[in-house]
Image: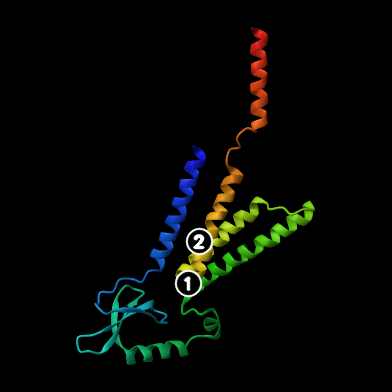
């Protein structure tokens, strides 16, 4: 019964995780009938804008700024603004592909997650060398879970479906392994049979 319940819980977790990934990657609804979401790079605005056809037949961008306000820009206005902002970026900003301090925080989170994710293999290797046999210590799964969670958050911010899907299903495996390590262990079947045998023998002697 417990095994069946765990199987349904695991299936539910996988389905829920897949739905969350799909919902996270889905484009935001547009208030304009023909609006489509496009990527832009402005330090004081969201990374996605809505490109739509205005009443005069001209294409315009609805850009949501970091303060929550939305401004309407023509293609020429957006191009000039992006050119001005991109020209002012430092080399490090271009290397990290960020536009503001908020972006540095996300890149830092992703890098730290990658360090943990790569470092788990080094830890597993060192533990195996010490034990003189292939060994997977619990810290391996903890580092995998922490690194994977950080990378999932980073890929979600980048809206990278490949990285997000790759990490999300591995995340479930790390949780499962940690659950099997720390769950209460049932008595060994041989020990149960031995105890039952002793009880039967004692009962027979008593009779």
Q: Which residue is mark 1?
A: 160
Q: How far is mark 2 from mark 1, CA to CA?
A: 12 Å
Q: Position of residue 142 (x, y in %)?
A: 60, 54
User: Does residue 151 appear to the left or right of 57 in the view shown?
Assistant: right
What quarter of the picture does the C terminus occupy? top right
* Residue at the extreme left: 55
- The residue shown at (77%, 53%) is 133
Between 43 and 152, which is closer to the camera in this rendering? Answer: 152
Q: Position of residue 41 (x, y in %)?
A: 42, 82
User: Does residue 138 appear to the left or right of 103 in the view shown?
Assistant: right
Between 101 and 127, which is closer to the camera in this rendering? Answer: 127
- The residue shown at (59%, 45%) is 180
Q: Which residue is mark 2?
A: 168
Q: Are marks 2 and 1 in contact (CB under 8 Å)?
A: no
Q: Earlier in the sequence, mark 2 or mark 1?
A: 1
Mark 1 crowd level (few <14, some 14–19, many ≥20, 10 Å Cα): few
* Residue at the extreme top: 207
Between 81 and 117, which is closer to the camera in this rendering? Answer: 117
User: Does residue 182 appear to the left or right of 29 in the view shown?
Assistant: right
On screen, residue 136 above or below 64 = above
Q: Quadrant of residue 27?
A: bottom left
């Amino acid at each position: 019964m417990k095994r069946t319940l765990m199987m349904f819980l695991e299936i539910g977790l996988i389905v829920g995780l897949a739905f969350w990934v799909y919902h996270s990657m889905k484009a935001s609804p547009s208030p304009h009938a023909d609006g489509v979401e496009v990527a832009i790079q402005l330090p004081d605005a969201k990374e996605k804008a809505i490109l739509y056809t205005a009443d005069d037949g001209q294409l315009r961008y609805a850009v949501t700024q970091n303060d929550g306000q939305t401004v309407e820009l023509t293609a020429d206005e957006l191009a000039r603004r992006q050119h001005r902002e991109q020209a002012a970026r430092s080399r490090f900003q271009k290397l990290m592909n960020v536009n503001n301090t908020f972006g540095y925080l996300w890149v830092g989170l992703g890098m730290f997650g990658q360090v943990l994710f790569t470092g788990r293999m080094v830890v597993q290797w060192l533990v195996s060398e010490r034990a003189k046999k292939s060994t997977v210590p619990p810290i391996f799964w903890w580092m995998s879970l922490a690194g994977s969670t950080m990378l999932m958050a980073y890929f979600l911010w980048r809206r990278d479906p490949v990285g997000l899907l790759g990490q999300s299903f591995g995340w479930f495996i790390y949780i499962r392994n940690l659950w099997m390590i720390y769950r209460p262990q049932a008595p060994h079947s041989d020990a149960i049979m031995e105890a039952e045998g002793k009880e039967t023998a004692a009962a027979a002697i008593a009779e």
